[in-house]
Image (cartoon, coloured by chain):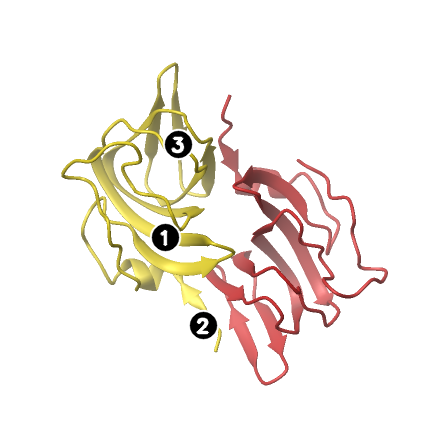
Chain colours: A red, B yellow
Amino acid sequence: MNQVVNIDQKLTEFSEFWTPKIVGDLNEQQVKLAKLKGEFVWHSHKDEDEMFLVIKGELKIEFESETKHLSAGEFLIIPKGQRHRPVADEEVHVLLFEPKSTLNTGDQQNHFTKNNLDKI
Amino acid sequence: MNQVVNIDQKLTEFSEFWTPKIVGDLNEQQVKLAKLKGEFVWHSHKDEDEMFLVIKGELKIEFESETKHLSAGEFLIIPKGQRHRPVADEEVHVLLFEPKSTLNTGDQQNHFTKNNLDKI
């Protein structure tokens, strides 16, 4: 049956950075949790908007023309096609909402790319 | 440009219960905030899964065969078609994630029904 998901509990179940874990599926979208630290790669998602909700820490999301700063309890929706780069000076925990089809590195393929995400 | 949304700030901007406010749009889905108190109506959503993420308070979601209890930092995905009733003994604040097409009372029309939601 339907499971209540405790976000803090799920966050204790993994430690890798930049490796989103699937914690929910609905309407062809997924809810993911991720731990971030350091600089990610510049990328964009051609067809998918992406939402970052910060659970813990301070996240910067760099765009070509500006940088957005997010604290715990804040979210940002990144429209499809917009180049961006998440940067976490210290460890950050985020909840992501995005279509099932979303690849973490979007139009880029590199050592950060995760093709098969775990469900936890 | 992209706006950072502070959930607590948005929650100060309205006080009505059972009146979701749209705070984000992505991928034909919407992010909504709502304040709940008391018993809602039994209903289901024929085509839409629905996610409740509790920001503050203790929420019960009754199903025909069980009741789920959610605290702050917990979420539950209610699959399409499943009859349910949210119950908040004390005031609860939730973030909802669901398709644009979702009507709050699903297959029911009554005094709780909100056809046009505000964007805040």
Above/below status of B45 relative to A72: above
The image quadrant that residue A117 belongs to is top right
Residue B5, label in figure: none
Q: Are marks 1 and 3 on the same chain?
A: yes
Alpha carbons under labels 1 and 2: distance apart = 15 Å
Q: Earlier in the sequence, mark 3 or mark 2?
A: 2
Alpha carbons under labels 1 and 3: distance apart = 19 Å
What is the number of callouts on the image?
3
Indicate the position of residue A50 as horizontal and vertical percent values.
57, 60
For disc 1, the marked residue is B32
Q: Which amino acid is tagged 1? A: Lys
Mark 1 residue crowding within 10 angstroms, few (<14) / some (14–19) / many (20+): many
The numbered mark 1 sits on a residue in which chain? B
- Can residue A38 be seen in the rendering of this structure? yes
Above/below status of B90 relative to A41: above
The numbered mark 2 sits on a residue in which chain? B
Mark 3 residue crowding within 10 angstroms, few (<14) / some (14–19) / many (20+): some
Q: Are marks 1 and 2 on the same chain?
A: yes
Alpha carbons under labels 3 and 2: distance apart = 32 Å
Residue at the location (57% across, 39% down)? A24
Q: Which amino acid is tagged 2? A: Gln
Indicate the position of residue B93 as horizontal and vertical percent values.
31, 46
Indicate the position of residue A111 as horizontal and vertical percent values.
85, 60
For disc 2, the marked residue is B3
For disc 3, the marked residue is B46
The numbered mark 3 sits on a residue in which chain? B
Q: Earlier in the sequence, mark 1 or mark 2?
A: 2
| Secondary element at tag 1 | strand
| Secondary element at tag 2 | loop
